[in-house]
Amino acid sequence: MKTRLIRISAFVLVIVLLVIAPFANAQEGPAQVGIRPDAPPYALHGPYWVGTMEIMIDPETESELPIRAWYPALNPEMALEAITYMVRTDAAFRIYTDPDRPLPSEGHALLNADPNLSAGPYPLVVLSHSYTCFSECQYFLAEHLASYGFVVLSPEHRGDTWELIAAPTIRRILEVNAVIAYAESATATEGELAGLVDMEHIAVGGWSSGGAVTYGAANAPLSWAGYEEYCAVIPEGFGCANMDNERAAALAAAGLETEPEGLWPAIGDPRVDAIVPMAGGGDLHGQRSLAELAVPMLALYGSNDTDASWFSLTYDQIASPQKAQVIFEGANHFIFGADCEAEPWVAEIGAYEWCSDSVWDKDRAHDLINHFVTAFLLSVLKGDTDATDALAPDAVAFPGITYEATGF
């Protein structure tokens, strides 16, 4: 009888372990959910916990550059991914409000968590924010990419003013170069990000002016003719009424004493493997320059954006044999930024249109942005064939999305 009881007890123990094992394993990683219950596959939270930290390049010098980093992280205490980002008091965005007013954004990451090096190093994504914004402007996308095994570094561009547009864009490209150079040194042995960053696989993404940066960051030559082409298509565009001053400042920012005939030199990093412009056109490049750009590209924008026709033209001019375009029908320029629930102060300062869209539910838009950008980067930086298949034209059928692609 005792032997039989022992066998029964052992059997029961095995059954209990089999029952609880899946739940134990489920606790090892974050819940695989999207922003909305109907999130598409690559909008679901990835397998990694998300860590975040602030970094300062060259502190207390003229080239000081704040960076917000997101990365795959360890979470041994099973802490909730929750963080309140605060806009810096010296951020360019402060021109719109009291410099001392707290401006929080509610995100989903673990502050200063230890990196998860188990599958590292991870591809690098440099994310350039929109004009006069701040590092965390697209935190929802940065957090999401980190959950899929990318290291995202977002510099806070300091030179944004509404006096000039072209020269700050050139300086932004140089700042993206500085971020890539920092990542290379920091991921080395004994570096701040030792073993974390895969410098063989790099993408640059950005929204608005940050999107305009991506082409030059991928080493497309500069071209003032491109800016003239932009102003011919969008004559009311920023800077188009002040072309002589814009040209002079752009030459100085590019380190040129006289304007070259034809294309200006390329000033980006040739190691950039892919670009993701979001509502960003090739303003400082134009047809001749973009015809030389062959890296994979994913472009996203809203059809109700005032520059939509220019974004479409830029997409057509890119020479890359592997490119895709996602158009949010009826969406405005601000669909790529945070929503009013996460940043209620945006509406409070009288800029409700910056955190909303008159047509799109922002949660749905963000799920789709996360889906497309994640699938694209998994495909071109990690060689994920399932992600590549998800970008094939016959695989994309979302209401409100117009999609075209070559090479997928």
Image (tube, rainbow, N blue to C red):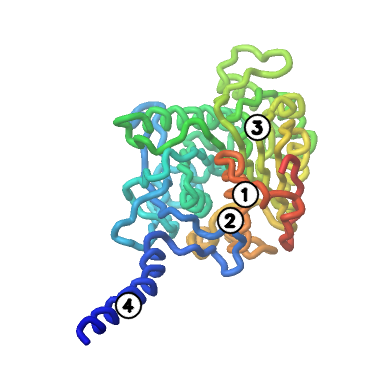
Q: Nearer the viewer, mark 1 or mark 2?
A: 1
Mark 3–mark 1 Cα distance, whole angstroms, equals 18 Å
| Mark 1 residue type | Ala
Q: Nearer the viewer, mark 1 or mark 4?
A: 4
Say which element carries label 2. helix
Q: Residue at x 33, y 61 (%)?
A: 79
Q: Name the mark on residue 387.
A: 1
Q: Is residue 90 above or below residue 159?
A: below
Say which element carries label 1. helix
| Mark 3 residue type | Val
Say which element carries label 3. loop
Mark 2–mark 3 Cα distance, whole angstroms, equals 22 Å
Q: Name the mark on residue 11.
A: 4
| Mark 4 residue type | Phe
Mark 1–mark 4 Cα distance, whole angstroms, equals 43 Å
* Count of numbered circles in the view: 4
Mark 3, residue position: 295
> Of marks 4 and 2, which one's residue comes earlier in the chain?
4
